[in-house]
Image (tube, rainbow, N blue to C red):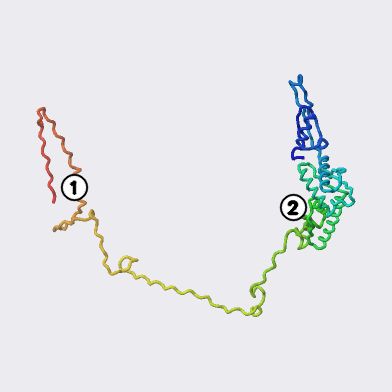
Amino acid sequence: MRGPMSIIEKEGKTVEQAIEKGLKEMGLSRDEVQVEIVSLGSSGFLGVLGGRPAKVRLNVQVQPRVKRIVETILAKMGFPGTVRSFSEDGGRLTALIESELGENPLQANNGAALDAMEYLIGKIFHESEQDIHLDIGGFRQSQGNHLKTLALELARKVKETGQEQKLAPMPPHQRKVIHKALENHPDVRTFAVGEGDRRRVIIAPRQSPSTGSASSPQAGSGHRPGPAPRPPDTARHSGQTPRQAGPQAPHKPRPQPEAKPQPEPRQKTTGKPGRRDSGRKPQVKPPRPQERQEQAPRSGMGQASRPVKTQERAESARQAAAPPPQAAPPLSPGGQETGFVPRSKKKPRRS
């Protein structure tokens, strides 16, 4: 079987030509497929117009192909043998091999050669819906009985000692026998560890449902004992007196840090607070020009002088209160003035 090509459909001028195309494409013989005719086809009018091709459906048969491949491998290995029959158990298909040899080499070393050939067959038929297994002379059945007996014996040891038992690395079908033999055992449980061909089964005590812990502190539940408690470091923790604990080193006083010199307090001054009296005379800030006052000579009445700024404001107020200048009179046709305009009086300047 070549992947998803377990069922294919082919067309041809005739049914035989369609079958030959399918067998050539899949690389199978006629007895390894089941042929289903979908359409016989027709030649049409005069064998030219309106003709339809024949169509067939080829379904690969697993058993004939397994038989051919297994017998080919045995011939290449030099082991004379043939596949006599098949047995089906659900999704499991077992090919029963018969050999003319009394002690077949396939059974040697606990069936290592038979396991290798079974692994190769499984890779070839990896797209099959059934798991394909090989057996010769009832070897698989006797091997399964031996594994069941071994599993029960190791389970008894685990129950007595409380320690887990490790089995040798096994192929998947042998590990499955161990798991199935002890799946309902009340005192032990099984699990597998490792990768690839080094994967093995471990039988460990079953955890107690009441306490949730293993039946023994050394059970193979995956937990390991923690580190030993640390011994006490001092006599107070160990419960011994200082004399029993041994001589102790004399206590050394802790050095005290040197005192830092304190800064001298600042002297208060008679002037502003927070400043030192440097002996210098306080400087008087001169007034701004616009704030200067113009001192007038004092009269006998004792009148005070006015500021210059006040005089300027009074002058501006008088100018604003003065009447606006009169407009010029109209001119006569000869260009002479018709009216008399008096001259403006000049205001005397104040000293």
Q: Is residue 304 above or below residue 70?
A: below
Give whichever of 102, 201 is nearer the camera: 102
Quadrant of the rendered structure where residue 54 is? top right
At label 1, the amino acid type is Glu
Q: For the point 30% across and 66% down, which residue is it?
A: 271
Q: Of tags 2 and 1, which is closer to the observer?
A: 2
Q: Which residue is mark 2?
A: 196
Quadrant of the rendered structure where residue 2 is? top right
**What element does badge 1 sit on?**
helix
Quadrant of the rendered structure where residue 108 is? bottom right
Q: Earlier in the sequence, mark 2 or mark 1?
A: 2
Give whichever of 333, 17 is nearer the camera: 17
Q: For the point 19% across and 54% down, which residue is it?
A: 306
Give whichever of 93, 233 is nearer the camera: 93
Query: Where residue 70 appears, x then y in whole percent?
Result: 82, 44
**What element does badge 2 sit on?**
helix
At label 2, the amino acid type is Gly
Tell me the CA gap for discs 2 and 1: 118 Å
14 left or right of 261? Answer: right
Q: Which residue is mark 1?
A: 315
Query: Where residue 42 appears, x then y in whole percent?
Result: 78, 23
Farthest residue toward the top?
46
